[in-house]
Image: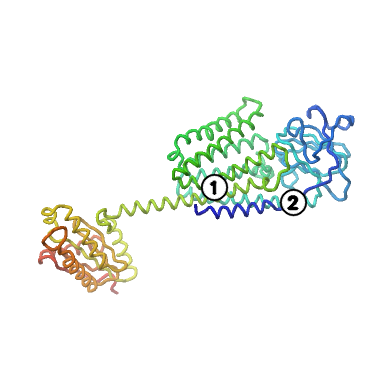
């Protein structure tokens, strides 16, 4: 596929951006201790400092909050002394509700990534707490993954956070640009595939903004924070459904892999839509089942989509190949990211920015696929138009195609004040040839005439079959004298080179009528005068040329 190396280069550039030093690594945590066997909701911030020392146990990894269930629980963090303003950061909190109690312990601070009001100085990739002393108590509720924490210098974090925002803005900007451009295509062409593509890309933008928390800091999207994690689940599932419908249309899966397509429609569209209905409905009230069920269903839909696309590509689906190039990296990075989060391991820059990078890469590749699709349709249209305007036997233009091009030639002659002439050719005794020697001989005469005339044509001349044995030759930039010379060369060439054809004893000859375009001529009037001149040549004995008379001046005359 011709876009392969371009796509690889683009992806490589994005991956290089992802390796930029966007995470400031802090080494200021001396010890991390976890509260043993106590539900977070039953321990209040006011009572946490009253617990005995034996209630906490030391955790080996001082940068991970791993509780009895994912990252939930209470922790005590001892921080090394240092100068300057420092921040306590809880990275990638997602659905977690984090409460922090630090000196002077007069009140606890609670944050979530969904808070409508947050510190505008920082992005939402981490919950930010200004460090005021030691030790620090951290309580987590609603976490689905182990959380990573860090103590970092405020200035270093601000610089790293700015790099994070720049990279994310580049990726999302690409997605928005491609989707808006495709929306314009849909407005002009009104083809559903462009609308589905634009909608799926915009939904991916919304998902990235929600997953990274930036949606809840934007004025037009802050209301999404009211839905919490359920809103992210809804956007992610809707994005998958739209993407599946786009794949069905764009990759022509219904035609190339009908059985797999039906299964993909159920797993990737119908069942996720049912899950969305259950998600927004009051029953069941407990929605904790949704993430696991939804993720398994979306994983199955992605795997089945890849299999279906591969089968369609194997069966000659060029556009399925475009989707495979853009879809495989997206599935790989999404799966690796989910695995990394579930394991509670540190989120590397490649995985943190791999998701928006491959989304942007996929958008560009699929955009190129849509452009290739447009080119394919244009080639098909040109092919159909070619066949619609061509005579099947001789290969020259048929009557409709000839008249259309004569219209253009007349308009050009008037605009540029140039000459234009037409020759009306008719094979002599053609009906007798058909009756005596059969239609095969008649067809041989027609193709022979076209071959001989074609060898006499100059650049810009055009020959078309106007009727059974009638042909019209358009001669741009040719006045009456030049057209008369061309007609004579054709008449002599037919008489000499078609003397014995298809077993006929009598030579093949042609009668030609000539008409020069005059001011006020239309296609119909010009053809009529050339036709009348051809009949005059017939009456004069055939195998000769007659010139049509007109009182008006030629079209190109001053």
So how many labels did they put on this image?
2
The picture quadrant where one finds residue 341 is top right
Classed neighbour count for the residue bearing mark 1: other residues with Cα under 10 Å, few (<14), some (14–19), many (≥20): some
From the image, which quarter does the C terminus lie in?
bottom left
Verify CB contact (< 8 Å) between mark 2 and mark 1: no
Which residue is rendered at x = 28% and y = 62% of the image?
Answer: 406
**Relative image position of residue 525 (x, y in whole percent):** 22, 62
Placement of 176 over or under 427, stated as above or below: above
Badge 2 marks a residue whose secondary structure is helix
**Relative image position of residue 381 (x, y in whole percent):** 38, 51
Which residue is rendered at x = 61% and y = 34% of the image?
Answer: 295
The residue carrying mark 1 is: 325
Q: Upstream in the sequence, badge 2 or badge 1?
A: 2
Residue 548 visible in this rendered orientation of the protein:
no
The residue carrying mark 2 is: 160
Classed neighbour count for the residue bearing mark 2: other residues with Cα under 10 Å, few (<14), some (14–19), many (≥20): some
**Relative image position of residue 236 (x, y in whole percent):** 60, 38
Badge 1 marks a residue whose secondary structure is helix
Which residue is rendered at x = 75% and y = 45% of the image?
Answer: 119
CA gap, disc 2 to disc 1?
Answer: 32 Å
Near-viewer residue (208 or 75): 75
Near-viewer residue (9 or 288): 9
């Amino acid at each position: 596929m011709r876009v392969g190396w371009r796509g690889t280069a683009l992806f490589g550039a994005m991956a290089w951006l992802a390796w930029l030093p966007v995470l400031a690594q802090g080494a200021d945590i001396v010890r991390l201790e976890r509260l043993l066997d106590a539900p977070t909701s039953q321990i209040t911030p006011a009572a946490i400092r009253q617990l005995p020392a034996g209630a906490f146990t030391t955790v080996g990894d001082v940068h991970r909050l791993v509780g009895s269930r994912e990252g939930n629980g209470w922790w005590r963090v001892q921080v090394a002394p240092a100068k300057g303003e420092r921040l306590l950061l809880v990275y990638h909190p997602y659905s977690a509700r984090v409460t922090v109690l630090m000196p002077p312990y007069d009140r606890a601070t609670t944050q979530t990534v969904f808070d409508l009001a947050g510190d505008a100085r920082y992005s939402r990739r981490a919950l930010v707490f200004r460090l005021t002393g030691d030790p620090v108590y951290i309580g987590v509720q609603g976490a689905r993954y182990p959380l990573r924490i860090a103590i970092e210098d405020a200035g270093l974090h601000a610089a790293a956070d700015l790099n994070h925002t720049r990279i994310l803005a580049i990726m999302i900007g690409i997605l928005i640009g491609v989707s808006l451009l495709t929306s314009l295509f849909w407005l002009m062409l009104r083809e559903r595939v462009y609308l589905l593509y634009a909608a799926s890309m915009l939904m991916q933008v919304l998902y990235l903004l929600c997953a990274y928390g930036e949606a809840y800091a934007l004025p037009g999207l802050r209301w999404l924070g009211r839905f919490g994690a359920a809103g992210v689940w809804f956007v992610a599932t809707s994005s998958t459904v739209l993407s599946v419908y786009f794949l069905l249309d764009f990759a022509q899966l219904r035609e190339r892999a009908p059985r797999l397509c039906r299964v993909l429609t159920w797993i990737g569209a119908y069942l996720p839509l049912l899950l969305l209905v259950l998600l927004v409905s009051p029953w069941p009230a407990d929605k904790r089942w949704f993430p696991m069920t939804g993720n398994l269903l979306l994983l199955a839909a992605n795997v089945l989509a890849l299999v279906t696309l591969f089968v369609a590509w194997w069966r000659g689906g060029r556009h399925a190949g475009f989707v495979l190039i853009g879809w495989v990296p997206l599935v790989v990075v999404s799966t690796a990211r989910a695995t990394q989060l579930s394991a509670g391991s540190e989120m590397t820059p490649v995985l943190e920015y791999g998701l928006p990078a491959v989304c942007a890469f996929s958008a560009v590749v699929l955009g190129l696929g849509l452009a290739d699709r447009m080119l394919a349709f244009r080639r098909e249209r040109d092919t159909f138009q070619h066949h619609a305007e061509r005579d099947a036997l001789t290969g020259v233009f048929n009557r409709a195609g000839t008249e259309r091009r004569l219209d253009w030639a007349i308009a050009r002659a008037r605009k540029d004040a140039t000459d234009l002439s037409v020759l009306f050719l008719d094979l002599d005794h053609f009906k007798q040839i058909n009756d005596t020697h059969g239609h095969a001989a008649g067809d041989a005469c027609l193709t022979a005439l076209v071959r001989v005339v074609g060898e006499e044509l100059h650049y810009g001349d055009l020959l078309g079959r106007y009727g059974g044995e009638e042909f019209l030759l358009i001669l741009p930039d040719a006045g009456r004298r030049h057209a008369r010379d061309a007609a004579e060369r054709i008449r002599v060439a037919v008489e000499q080179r078609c003397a014995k054809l298809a077993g006929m004893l009598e030579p093949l000859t042609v009668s030609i009528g000539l008409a020069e375009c005059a001011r006020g001529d239309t296609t119909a009037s010009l053809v009529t005068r050339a036709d009348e001149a051809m009949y005059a040549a017939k009456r004069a004995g055939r195998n000769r040329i007659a010139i049509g008379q007109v009182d008006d001046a030629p079209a190109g005359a001053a």
